[in-house]
Amino acid sequence: MFAQLVINLESRRGAQAAPEVRAALHAAAIEFVEGGWPDDIAGNVDCIIAAGGDGTLLSAIASALERDLPLGVIPLGTFNDLARTLRVPFDIRGAIEVIASRNARAIDVGRVNGHYFVNESSIGISSRISRLQTTGIKKRFGFLAVLATAVQAFRYARPIHAEIVHAGGVETLKTIQLTIANSYHFGGFLSVSDAAIDDGWLDLYSVDIENAWEAFCIGRAMLAGQRENVPGLRTLRGKRFEIRTHHEHHIEADAEPAGKTPATFEILPKALRVFVPH
């Protein structure tokens, strides 16, 4: 196997783990190149390997889709949502054994404003949280960085007036958070029981709360995998959502900037092959 290796040295474990990643790839008889290479070499690449967090994967997805190459995941980030969803081992050697097995699964990919995402895309509080988190904060504090920035983001939360156009009609919402999820596992700890990363659907969640108790109830329900009949939480399922807001709002896709509203979110069914355990 000959791979293009992308290591994010700024991810939580990237710089520390890079030598081990390279050594383990050699031990598994996986040849690789890092960075750019001539076209005659690029044509012989069998896969792309992304070593880092979920943001690192985004840099590899566009190339993998364009060249129809499978993607290998070595989770070195803070949350590693895609690795959790696909049950890719968190230890480096275990993740590389999965890649060496060449067992690939086709998964859906979301797209907004030309940006891809595999877990979720958001407008509102989580988008502000992502902008508040610096690389240094995430590397030093991990999940605690999310809690700290979440408290700060809630202090400045303001309602978003949004119009959602989908196959079933038009919805008008006043919300503080819109999440468009491609996977059943996202946000580091949220899971939804009746969704999947290869079901061909996007799930939209709108949070409209009046007080802290409703926020607690929604958080508890999402942690339990519940999304129906939760006060303050509205859900839609579709293959395409057009979202318009009264004012421009930042969008994030898997915690990376993805432009501003208005925007169209769409699903690319089973567009990406990823190496997974047998």
Image (cartoon, helix red, strand yellow):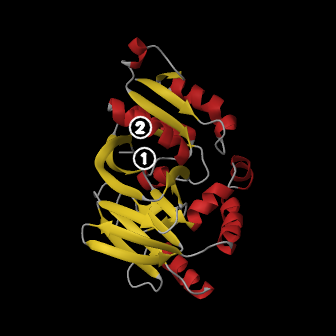
Structural distance between the alpha carbons of marks 2 and 1? 7 Å
Residue plotted at (44% across, 52% down): 87
Kind of residue at badge 2:
Ala
Residue 116 is marked as: 1
Element at badge 2?
Answer: helix
- Residue 233 pos. (x, y %): 45, 79
Q: Which residue in the structure is indicated by mark 2?
A: 62
Viewer can see residue 193: no
* Percent position of residue 278, x then y: 35, 45
Does residue 50 lie above or below 157 as drawn?
A: above
Whether tag 2 and tag 1 are in contact, CB under 8 A, the answer is yes
11 on left or right of 123: right
Q: Nearer the viewer, residue 14 or 108?
A: 108
In front of the other: 95 or 206? 206
**Residue at x 42% of width, y 63% of height:** 180
- Specify whether 8 is left or right of 245: right
Residue 235 in view of the camera: yes
Q: Amino acid at mark 1?
A: Tyr
Q: Position of residue 116 (x, y in %)?
A: 42, 47
Report the residue at 53% width, 62% height from top.
249
Where's residue 89, x and y in %? 50, 47
The image shows residue 220, relative to residue 102, as above or below, that is: below
* Residue 199 position (above or below residue 13): below
Q: How many marks?
A: 2
User: Pointer 2: residues within 10 angstroms few (<14), some, or many (20+)?
Assistant: some
250 to 172, vertically: above or below: above
Counting residues from the start of the chain, the first of labels 2 and 1 encountered is 2
Left of 113 or right of it: where is 18?
right
Q: Nearer the viewer, residue 48 or 244?
A: 244
Residue at 34 percent across and 62 percent down: it is 241
Residue furthest to the front = 246
Q: Nearer the viewer, residue 24 or 77?
A: 77
